[in-house]
Image: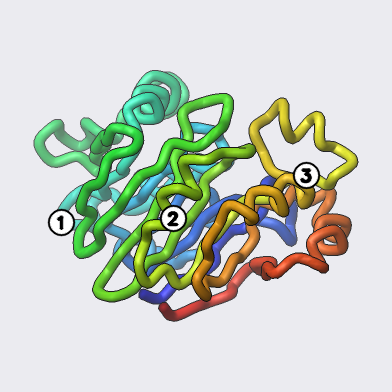
């Protein structure tokens, strides 16, 4: 699997883009930076999008994507979302008020977008990838994922505070090459992190003690733009890397 970092921040500024990763040019993990980074031809190659939860920074490019690729693909782009997330997308985004319902445009039988739901905690197939969803700890229903193709697996925490289900699942995964894990706020804002369901370097260190990493890389994302420098200093002593825009990996 080839992974490209399109967005790895917990907010957007000219030098920061919200969460979005691209696997093998065809599978997107969250949709925070699709239309701001990919060309039209590249956008048309994206067949599936895994959405971890409904918060705006993770889904914001879905409406613009639909508007750009209409008439340029033979089939719909499939958005894979948990039941709660799918309901939010239908009720609040593609509702013909905030944005046209591209799940029915140009026709119900041949839409630009298709929303396919999954039960949080279930496993399912997305193209050539096997996906295990993992419920994590956040104010809305949020999932992490393990994506497996061939002999390699890649994991993503999703937006989460302290959790146990994620680590129990990851510790059973064979050939896990890398874990993308969120870390949003500096230690001084621990109360805010706890309230909003995010990690700080302090809670990240505790969480990693639950992880039998077996050689897997741990790569941090979702750093809030106002605190990137501070967060990098606070995680400097931990066995982790910090993702940067444009990073690419092969697993």
Identify whether 127 is placed above or below 108. Answer: below
Whichever of labels 1 and 2 marks the residue nearer the N terminus, that label is 1
* Mark 1–mark 3 distance (CA, rounded to whole Å): 42 Å
Q: Which mark is residue 142?
A: none
Mark 3 crowdedness (10 Å alpha carbons): few <14, some 14-19, many ≥20: many
Residue for badge 2: 170
The residue drawn where x is 50% and y is 37% is 136
Whichever of labels 1 and 3 marks the residue nearer the N terminus, that label is 1
Judging from the image, what secondary structure is the residue with disc 3 in?
Answer: loop
With 103 as the anchor, is 182 left or right in this view? right
Is residue 133 in view from this perspective? Answer: yes
Residue for badge 1: 74
Position in image of residue 223 (x %, y %): 72, 52
Q: Which mark is residue 185?
A: 3
* Mark 1–mark 2 distance (CA, rounded to whole Å): 36 Å
The quarter holding residue 73 reads: bottom left
Quadrant in which the N terminus is drawn = bottom left
Mark 1 crowdedness (10 Å alpha carbons): few <14, some 14-19, many ≥20: few
Task: Nearest to the eye among marks 1 and 3: give it.
Answer: 3
Judging from the image, what secondary structure is the residue with disc 1 in?
Answer: loop
The residue drawn where x is 53% and y is 66% is 213
Task: Nearest to the eye among marks 1 and 2: give it.
Answer: 2
Identify which residue, 20 or 143, lies in the foreground. Answer: 143
The residue drawn where x is 38% and y is 57% is 172
With 159 as the anchor, is 111 left or right in this view? left
With 160 as the anchor, is 235 left or right in this view? right
Judging from the image, what secondary structure is the residue with disc 2 in?
Answer: helix
| Residue that extends furthest to the left in the rendered view of this protein | 109
Identify which residue, 24 or 92, lies in the foreground. Answer: 24
Position in image of residue 228 (x %, y %): 80, 57
């Amino acid at each position: 699997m080839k992974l490209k970092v399109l967005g790895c921040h917990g907010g957007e500024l000219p030098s920061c883009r919200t969460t979005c990763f691209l696997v093998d040019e065809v599978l997107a993990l969250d949709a925070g930076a699709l239309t701001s980074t990919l060309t039209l031809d590249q956008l048309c190659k994206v067949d599936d999008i895994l959405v971890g939860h409904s918060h705006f920074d993770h889904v914001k490019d879905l409406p613009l994507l639909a508007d750009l690729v209409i008439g340029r693909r033979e089939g719909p782009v499939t958005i894979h979302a948990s039941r709660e997330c799918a309901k939010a997308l239908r009720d609040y985004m593609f509702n013909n008020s905030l944005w046209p319902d591209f799940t029915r445009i140009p026709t119900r039988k041949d839409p630009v977008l298709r929303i396919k739901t999954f039960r949080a905690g279930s496993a399912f197939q997305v193209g050539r990838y096997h996906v295990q969803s993992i419920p994590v700890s956040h104010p809305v229903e949020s999932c992490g994922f393990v994506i497996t193709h061939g002999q390699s697996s890649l994991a993503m925490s999703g937006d989460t505070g302290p959790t146990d289900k994620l680590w129990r699942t990851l510790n059973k995964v064979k050939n896990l090459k890398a874990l993308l894990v969120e870390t949003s706020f500096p230690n001084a804002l621990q109360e805010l992190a706890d309230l909003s369901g995010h990690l700080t370097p302090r809670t990240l260190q505790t969480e990693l003690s639950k992880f039998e990493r077996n050689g897997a890389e741990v790569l941090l994302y979702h750093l809030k733009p106002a605190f990137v420098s501070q967060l990098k200093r606070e995680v400097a002593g931990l066995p982790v890397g910090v993702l940067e825009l444009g990073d690419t990996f092969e697993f």
